Amino acid sequence: QVQLVESGGGLVQAGGSLRLSCAASVAFFSRKIMGWHRQAPGKQRELVASISGDGNTNIADSVKGRFTITRDNARNTVYLQMNSLKPEDTAVYYCAARQPWATEYFTYGQGTQVTVSS
């Protein structure tokens, strides 16, 4: 059974930081590409950051230099460190997993709300 559980969201002032965690129950976790997506009200979901099993990362231009994605394969957990948060970062953040050869993510967590006040 595949399950992704996000935590760490909340309300923070602009310029602040949050660290999101995603605990994954997925077979062969270390082989999966893990990603953090977000969806703001009225907007499409967007991929914020992804990380391969061996730690190669891709970060969206909108958050580059402010967000960092990491993973701990021993703990089946992926993290998103968010610094210098802006009001436009307000969204529901979702953890997701995909196969290395796939373009689509096959499972998402329930999401965690991040709200940045100005």
Image (cartoon, rainbow, N blue to C red):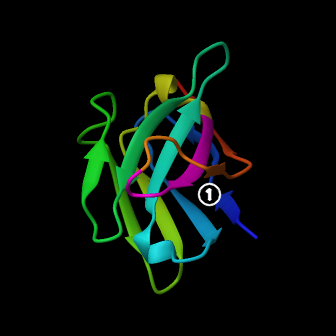
Q: Say left or right for 24 vs 31.
A: right
> Residue lying furthest front in this view?
101
As for residue 114 lying within the magenta part, the answer is no
Magenta part of the chain: 92-101
**Could you tell me which secondary element the residue under label 1 belongs to?**
loop
The 10 Å Cα crowd at callout 1, few under 14, some 14 to 19, many 20 or more, is some
Image quarter of residue 30: bottom left
- Residue drawn where x is 62% and y is 70% of the image: 23
Residue at 44 percent of width and 79 percent of height: 73
Q: Quick check: 57 above or below 63?
A: below
Q: Is residue 78 above or below residue 51?
A: below
Position of the N terminus by quadrant: bottom right
Name the dominant secondary structure of the magenta segment: strand
The residue nearer to you, when weighing 61 against 105, is 105
| Residue 2 in picture, x, y percent from top left | 71, 66
Q: Position of residue 19 (x, y in %)?
A: 49, 57
Q: Which residue is mark 1?
A: 8
- The residue at the point 38 percent across, 53 percent down is 101
